[in-house]
Amino acid sequence: MQKSVLGYGSIFHKEDITRLPEISDTSFLGNHTLFYAGRYAIKYIIDCILKERDIATLWMPNYYCPYVKNWLEEKRSSIKYYDIDPFDANAQINWKQFDASDVVLTNNYWGIKANPIPSGTRPLIIEDHSHGWLSEGCVQSKADFCIASLRKTLPIPLSGIAWKPKNGNCTIPLLPINGAAVDHNTDPMTRSWNLMDDAMTKKANCSDPKEKSEFLSSYSQGEMLLRNTQEIFEVQNIHKELIRKALFKDYNSFKKQNLEYIHQNLAPSTAYKLLYLEHPVPFGLLLVFKDKETMASCKHYLIDNAIYPAELWPKNTIAQKYKHLLNLHVDFRYTTDDMRYLVAVINRWSSENHDTDMQKTSEISEKLAP
């Protein structure tokens, strides 16, 4: 992979994952079903619940993926939103606002958010671990159901999962997917998988800007198929096999090492808040901003320097002081040398545009210099 052309971040490239170590304990995962994306896992669990009981209201966090919100709203009218600070790992949900006949979707924000389950009469709880697969909150969950969009962590074209944590006590079963027979040459999930697989392959071998445009176009087409498909398709066996091979790799060990380096070398700045914990390991390098303008300034500067952050998420309005997040990928694709480059660029943006601790920035710049 040519970083001089591709830069840092964006989608995964095709990778030989046999080199990655496995986690030692996978016992947390109870009965489970694989999907092509996390949104299908949510819809599937709702369908399983509706087989057993009515749902008065589906509650979702106000700060959530706008595409999934819109996708679910297309088919459900009884959706409401509750407030929770996505950038405070200690913020607690006000469970008094829900009825026992409701279903509440909670989020393990960025892999560092624990969601204690209330005792007594309560709504059913679906916990989203899309940005915290194999995090402490994921493996110790006591929710009724859990889901994850696995493709945010696994270098796989498409992947999602729904499961019943072994620490939970919900008696509603996960049912077989009863989909009609499909032609895998034309169904949208196979087409989406093939487009994204093509994008990942092209990225792995990309050596010039024209090829970069081609893999981004393939990926975009695959993504649009997901957004426009409501039907749940059972994952093909050949795809299940690829997902399972990647399911329990120790992705967090690479993030932990890279984030420790960043935390030691990133200069303090008034422009953003660094959302970082030594334990549990965050999803990535998380920079949180109070206003959209400052976030956009940083984002554009990073892109100009071939660093491609993800904005998680646009189109959300919240009342908290910090409102916007950029995630920079620090996964197994990247080394300490790569982290040195990321830190140097962020520190330079801060020193050029904001009231940074100039003395520490100068000291760090000297340390980072080749």
Image (cartoon, rainbow, N blue to C red):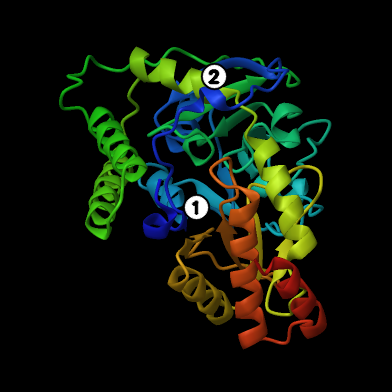
Left or right relative to 70: residue 365: right
Quadrant of the frame with the N terminus: top left
Quadrant of the frame with the C terminus: bottom right
Q: Are marks 2 and 1 in contact (CB under 8 Å)?
A: no
Give residue 135's position: percent from left, percent from top: 70, 35
Choose between 344 and 228: the one closer to the eye: 344
Task: For marks 2 and 1, give the one nearer the viewer.
Answer: 1
Instruction: Please tell me in which quadrant of the rendered image residue 368 appears.
Output: bottom right
Instruction: In the rendered view, tell whether residue 355 sits above or below residue 204.
Output: below
Left or right relative to 4: residue 52: right
Left or right relative to 278: residue 337: left
Choose between 221 and 22: the one closer to the eye: 22
Q: How many residues crowd mark 1 within 10 Å: few (<14), some (14–19), many (20+)? A: some
Q: How many residues crowd mark 2 within 10 Å: few (<14), some (14–19), many (20+)? A: few
| Residue found 61% across the figure and 30% down from its top | 146
Pick whichever of labels 2 and 1 is earlier in the sequence: 2
Left or right relative to 156: residue 299: right
- Label 2: element kind: loop
| Residue found 44% across the figure and 52% down from its top | 10
Name the residue tied to disc 1: 65
Name the residue tied to disc 2: 52
